[in-house]
Each structure stands twice: as C-alpha cells, then as structure tokens.
Amino acid sequence: MLSYLARRLLVAIPTILVIITVAFFMMRAAPGGPFDLERPMPEEIRQNVMAAYGMDQPVWKQYLDYMAGIARFDLGPSLKFRDKTVADIIAEGFPVSAVIGALSISLAVFVGTIMGSIAALRQNSAADYSVVGISTVGIVIPPFVMGPILALLVGLHWGLLPTGGLDPRYGMTVERLILPVVTLALPQIAIISRLMRASMIEVLRSNYVRTARAKGLPAGSVVVRHALRSAVLPLVSYLGPAAAALLTGSIVIEQVFQLPGIGRQFVQAALQRDYTVVMGVVILYASLIIVLNLVADLLYAALNPKVKYD
Amino acid sequence: MAFASPPTEKAEMMERAAVRGRSLWDDARSRLLRNRAAVASLVLLGVLTFLAFIGPLLWVHDSSFIYRDRVQIPPGWENLHLFGTDAQGRDLLARTLVGLRMSLMVGVVATAVSLVIGVLWGATAGFIGGRVDQLMMRIVDVLYSLPFIFFVIILMVVFGRNIILIFVAIGAVEWLTMARIVRGQTISLKSMEFVEAARAAGVSQFAIIRRHIVPNVLGPVVVYVTLTIPAVILAESFLSFLGLGVQEPLTSLGNLISNGARDMEVAPWTLIVPALTMMLTLFCFNFVGDGLRDAIDPKDR
C-alpha cells in the first residue's frame, strides 16, 4: 500500500514537470506580451520593466529560473497586478472555487446515489423512468445554458434568490451559493444517478444479495449494508474524472454568476498574457487532478477487497 | 421437407442462403430500426442538418444583415422574424441556423480528427503489443490526468481564435478514449479463434485486417463517434461562451447562447432559441448513440 502510494507520487512528479514545461512554452509562443496592452511606454522604461521581471533573458534562461522558483514553491509575481504575487491571487480565488466545487460534488453524490438506487430498486416503474428522463436532460443541458436559465427564472422572474456576485462585504452566504452550486451539480447528478442505477441493478441480481435476502435480513439493511457497498464502486472510480469536470465547469459558473473564483482569473490571465498567473493556475489544477485521482483509486481499493495494491 | 423439394430448387436455396446470410450489421440495423427513440432522433437530426445547411440560403433574412430599426423584436409574424431579432437587429432564426451549421461542422470535423488519431494510436499499440504498447498507453494515462481544457484555452489564446485550430484542438483532446477502446478491441480480437483460423487457412495479413479486425473494431468505434460529436459540440460551445471560440461574423450555438445570456433580461428569446436548438441536437445525438450501442453490442441481445 505504502509502496504503491510512493510509486504513484513518483510518477506524478514527471507528469507535473511535463505539464509545466508544455504550458510554459505555449504561453511564451503567444504573440504579444504582458506589457503590450497598456499605454505605450518609453523604450527605456519598457526595458527596465522587462528586466525587473527577468523577461529580457533568453527563453531557456527564463524557463530555468521559473523551474528554480517552483522548486522553492515560489510561483513568482503577477505580471498584471503589480503588488500581488501569484500565490496571493490563488489564495483569493481558490477558496471560492473550492467551496463551490466541494459543495457541488457532495450534493451530486448524495442526490445521485439516492436517485440511482431508487430507480434500480423500482426498475421500470414511473420513478425509474423519471430518474432516467431527468438524467438524460441533465446530460444534454450544459452548465452555461442551465446557469443563465436558472438565473433568469429563479433570480429575475420569481425573485427568489440573488443571481450573482459574491459581495466581499457579505462573503459567501447560503442564498448566493445555492444557484451556482446547483447549476454545477446538475450534470454530475445526471451522470452519477445513471452510473448508480446500472451498477445497483447488477448488484441486486448477484448471489450474495439473494443470500442476504434468503436468510431473512430486512430489505432496508440488504440494500444499505450489502448492495450499496459494492454498487458505489463504479461511482468511486468516476470521482476522479468528475472532479476534473467540476473544475472545468466552475470556469463557466464563475463567469455566469460573476464569482471571484480562480477559473475566471485563469481566463482573464490567459487573455492578458499574465504568464505567471496562468502557469500557477495550471500547476494548481494539474496537482489537484492528480491528487484527486489518487484519492479515488485508494478509496476504491479500500472499498473493494478484491483490489490489492502492492 | 428438404428432400421433398426438387434438387435444383435446393441448390438455389443454398446459394441464396450463402449470399444472404444475416451479418452482424443486418442484425444491428434491424435492431436499430426497432428503437423508436433512435429512429425519431435520426430523422430529426437529418431535418436539423438539412435546415442548417440549406435553410440560410432559402430564408428571407440574411444571418448577418442588420435591421437598424428592428432591435430585439420578440418572436412573431411581423416581418417574418419568427424567432425575433438580436441586440444588433439581426434575424435570430437565420443566425440560429448558421450557428447550428457551425456547431455541426465543428462536431463532425473535430470528431474526425479524434477518430484518426485515436484509431491509429490504439490500433498500433494493440497490434505491436509489448513494450511499445506499454509506453503508448502510459502516455494516454498521463494525458488523461491533464487539465485539458486549460491547454485548449491557452492554445486559443496563443494562436488566435482560428477556426481550423478549434477543430484540431478539440479533436486532439478527445482522442484518448477512442485510443483505449480501439486498443482493447484489437488486443482481444488478435487472439480470437476465428482470426487464428483465418491465419491457419492461409489468409493474408491484410485480408485478416480487412475482413475480420476492421469490421469488429468498427462497432464500438461507431458508437463512440456518435457520443463524441455531442461532446465536441459542447466543448466548442464552452469555448465560445468564454469568448474563445468561433468569432464574429461567424457564429455558433455557443456564441449565440453566450450573447443571449447577456441580453436575457430584456430579450429572453435570444437565449432560449439557441439553447433549445442545442439541447435538441444533443438529445438526438445521445439517443442515436444509445440506440447504436444497444444495436451493435451483442451482449444485450
């Protein structure tokens, strides 16, 4: 187990290095630079600014410097926000994205598991068909359609909830979080309830569930203690990709609901050639995805006695 | 009763049986045709595609013509703005059709790119096997764990929002699953008895690939292609929504939805019309994909 963990982390290091390298050179290949969009500045000042950020050096030298910084866990200064480092920007934006992401995935797993299980237990009933119907709808309506529609209906038309913006004065209040979290969770609820339904149907047909029923266990405990435990396995291995999908989705959600999260920062930074911020966010997300995949795999092994990592 | 029939008729019957054996594909077709949701979706997709490609040529309004005095007119019969006009005074029906055309094109072309890369990669890894296979599939594993959308965003920013690049970039992101499917299928087919039998009977390598491997790999690939197209359409719309996809004067459904979302308080139809069009298209692709999977996968017979 420990050696498996060590091996996975060892593979993660070259992966991250490749990601950093590709992202670094892709950004540098972009036409235009971080200081182009502002009002034209005298050549000497421009030279000074470039030198201050080390950008007068050849690209390979910049790359080595950047890597040296990474080794010291230093992501460097932002090129656009003069008095902020990349770490500052991430520290501002990431909590917003993380809270929304964590709430969404919890909601999606909770609702999706229940919906899928009910559909499987009452296969071919009205409840089953409505779950399948809802999940099909959830899959074909992307967040960037659902978000505006929810904002339009719930927020503007019925005036029930605020449509957007996390006012820094009030912070993240529950009312302000409901719409973004639900919008982000809906497609995941759809996928999870489908997965759950299929695997639950299969498990309910298995011999050990029949045995558990035959020996007279109450129906509830057969489902919850016996069937559910192996039925959630496909769900657990889906959590890695789901986490990645949530990160992507949150870019849209932050745009639609005007939340000051990291996804929005990333798009802005990429458009403005804020190299260091782009790199910082890419590194953050790549590490997150790697860690979440690893956690999902370990959880899978913990729940499934057939799988042994060594 | 066979002995009762004259010998010539029997020979004829046998010959006909040899020619008209029910192949896997005949079976699949008949099963697909029995699936009403899939057939309806297929027909609807045909209609949508026809409208998207022919409609803009026939419709009374040009998709880019600006009616200065008809800004954000609600849907109605007046001046034949059936779906209303947008914030610039352009006919929304015409724009939706043009946008749908672009989305369909992106879907098909990018899927084709992912198909070529995925099939070549997966088939090569599966055929050669051993170390090469290990290495190629490890690369796929690593790529799987990348935050790809970030790279697509960087790509779009770096190389400008060039339409060809959108095709290639999305296609280059979507090939991984295809490679895995093709590799798995190739490996399991390689060791099948009927392939071995063909080899023992002296059938050439090329003929084996053409007659036995390709048709058997094709099933899952076709299914996956029908499910990739909507995924690609979504990916493009996502980019357009962020302002990184197709640029004016060209438009796509994602683009229209993005504009509609901005104007939804005063002109909700500019959001609803393209959003419904996209949902309808994605619905159809999903039903066709599910139907094909049920039809082609012999396990569920």
Image: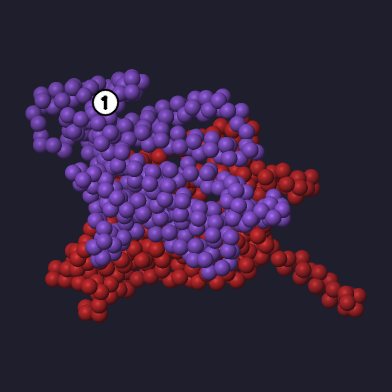
Chain colours: A purple, B red
Residue B283 versus residue B194 in the image, above or below: below
Q: Secondary structure at mark 1?
A: loop
Residue B165 versus residue B92 in the image, above or below: above
Disc 1 residue crowd, few under 14, some 14–19, many 20+, Cα 10 Å: some
From the viewer's perspective, tell me whether residue B24 is left or right of residue B17: left
Quadrant showing the C terminus of chain B: bottom right
Residue sitting at x 80%, y 72%: B13
Residue B63 appears in the rendering: no
Q: Chain of mark 1?
A: A
Residue B117 in percent (x, y) is at 50, 44
From the viewer's perspective, tell me whether residue A310 is left or right of residue B165: right
Residue A221 in percent (x, y) is at 60, 52
Three-letter amino acid code of the residue under disc 1: Gly
Q: Dot 1 corresponds to which residue? A: A76
Residue sitting at x 81%, y 73%: B12
Residue sitting at x 72%, y 68%: B20
Residue B55 versus residue B134 in the image, above or below: below
The one nearer the camera, A280 or B4, is A280
Residue B14 in percent (x, y) is at 81, 69
Residue sitting at x 54%, y 64%: A128
Residue A38 appears in the rendering: yes
Residue A156 in percent (x, y) is at 23, 63
From the viewer's perspective, tell me whether residue B30 is left or right of residue A25: right
